[in-house]
Amino acid sequence: MEVPGVRSVTIGRVLSATLLAVVLTVLAAGCGSDSSDELNGITRVPPAKTENVALPDESPESKGKTVALKGEDGGLMLVYFGYTSCPDVCPTSMADLRLALADLDPEQRERVQVSMVTVDPKRDSGKVLNGYLGHFFNQGEYHSLRTEQPGKLARAEKAFGASHELGKPDAEGEYDVSHTAQIYAVDDRGVVQVEWPFQTDPELISQDLKNLLENNSNPDA
Amino acid sequence: MKKLALLLTLVLSMGVVLAACGSDDSDSGSSSSVEVTDVWTRATTPTQDTGAVYMTINSADGDTLTDASVPTSVAGKTEIHETTTDGEATAAEDSMESGNMESDSSMEGNSEEMHGSGDMHGDSGAMMGMKQIDQLDIPAGETVTLEPGGFHIMLLELKGQINDGDTIPVTLTFEKAGEVQVEAVAKDE
Ligand SMILES: [Cu+2]
């Protein structure tokens, strides 16, 4: 949705964000109630498509088998790019996601999978990833996605609009990692339906999940 | 719920530490009071080698946190860290220019915590990282909160998993108040 007239606004950031939100809300109200208008997270036009992205999954079920980054039939895959030596941003995201999933009824939750793609495959072995994700999610619910091929990782990131940077190693070989911290919800066609920025309220995430799963369970939707 | 309430009580009762509370000579730099509350650490996963401790620090006269440490049996290194969001300064402009955020209505009234959302530049979201800082200023009469997405005491080279309910002794060093001992309670949330 184009928002003419908002581009040149140079007032304070908070105010302009609120203004944008208000403008968008007004616009959305004017164009009927497509379900996507009710989502709390960010939606893009056009949406990112990840249907051709697949990465090796080190989870106990897949044991290195390649998994497509999209939901199962009628389901959603929630994708996060991160690393496990991240003590603040990543566990906060995972804990928030765990809270959001806990709010789903069992039938809906079964249709949701969580995938973490490590941007630090050197330190994050498959075992490390499984230990990490297994702490937050049920076995069979998560995918530990990992490739040692930088090009493959870069292509996956590009499809989502994600990115990361590895800093220069210090004397002890330690290095900083920075990365985008969105959680993406991909449907069964490989379309990113919505993405939630870091620290989105878990309640808003679960609302979006319910919304998407309800629409998805109806084949005519 | 009950457990949470209990934890909160624990945190409150254990975390309140008043250091060097001289009340009669507040004009001299030698005495100052620092109040540290709500000290907690996120329980770690079995394979995590880093952790983060959060807390609320209050100083009536103003002080500076210059160091933090935990026993080496817990972590090999302890540092004061700040989580960073790249492109923060130009975020508003960028998000306006991209013009592709269709549904952002939830962000209103939440703009403070939703930094990330405002930081959409072009096709990618904000890059989050963290950096070590030498010190953390606690302005007089103000409360500084170390919390997810902001400041944290970073634990590196963890010696073992931190489980829900564990407590970790943390020694904080302030410029004026000197050393302050607090206990971080581990929460799996
Ligand atoms: Cu850190």
Image (cartoon, coloured by chain):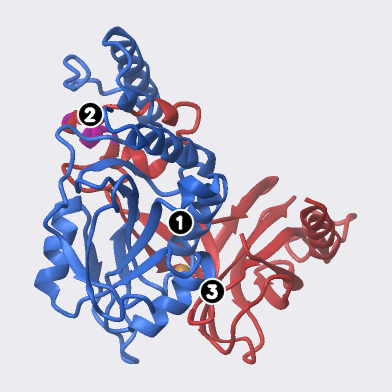
User: Who is closer to the viewer here, A159 or B77?
Assistant: A159
Residue A102 among those drawn in magenta: no
Q: Secondary structure under badge 3? A: strand
Q: Which mark is residue B96?
A: 2
Q: Taking B33 as reference, is A13 left or right?
A: left
Of marks 2 and 3, which one's residue comes earlier in the chain? 3
In which quadrant is the C terminus of chain B drawn?
A: bottom right
At a point 45% along the width and 26% down the height, the residue shown is B108
In the rendered structure, the colour chosen for chain A is blue
Magenta-drawn segment: B92-97
Q: Residues within 10 Å of mark 1 (few under 14, many from 20)?
A: many
Say which chain is red: B
| Labels 2 and 1 positioned on one and the same chain | no
Position of residue B10 measured from the top left corner of the image (x, y, whole percent) = 83, 62
> Most prominent secondary structure in the magenta stretch?
helix
Quarter of the view holding residue B21: bottom right
- Identify the residue at the far right of this view: B24
At a point 34% along the width and 62% down the height, the residue shown is A115
- Residue under mark 2: which chain is it in? B
- Residue under mark 1: which chain is it in? A
User: Compared with residue A58, is residue B87 higher up or lower down, i.e. above or below?
Assistant: above
Position of residue A203 measured from the top left corner of the image (x, y, whole percent) = 53, 39
> Is there CB contact under 8 Å for labels 3 and 1?
no
**Mark 2 and mark 1: span between their CA atoms?**
26 Å
- Residue under mark 3: which chain is it in? B
- The amino acid pointed to by label 3 is Gly
- The amino acid pointed to by label 1 is Ser
Residue occupied by mark 1 = A93
At a point 27% along the width and 45% down the height, the residue shown is A187
**Mark 3 and mark 1: span between their CA atoms?**
14 Å
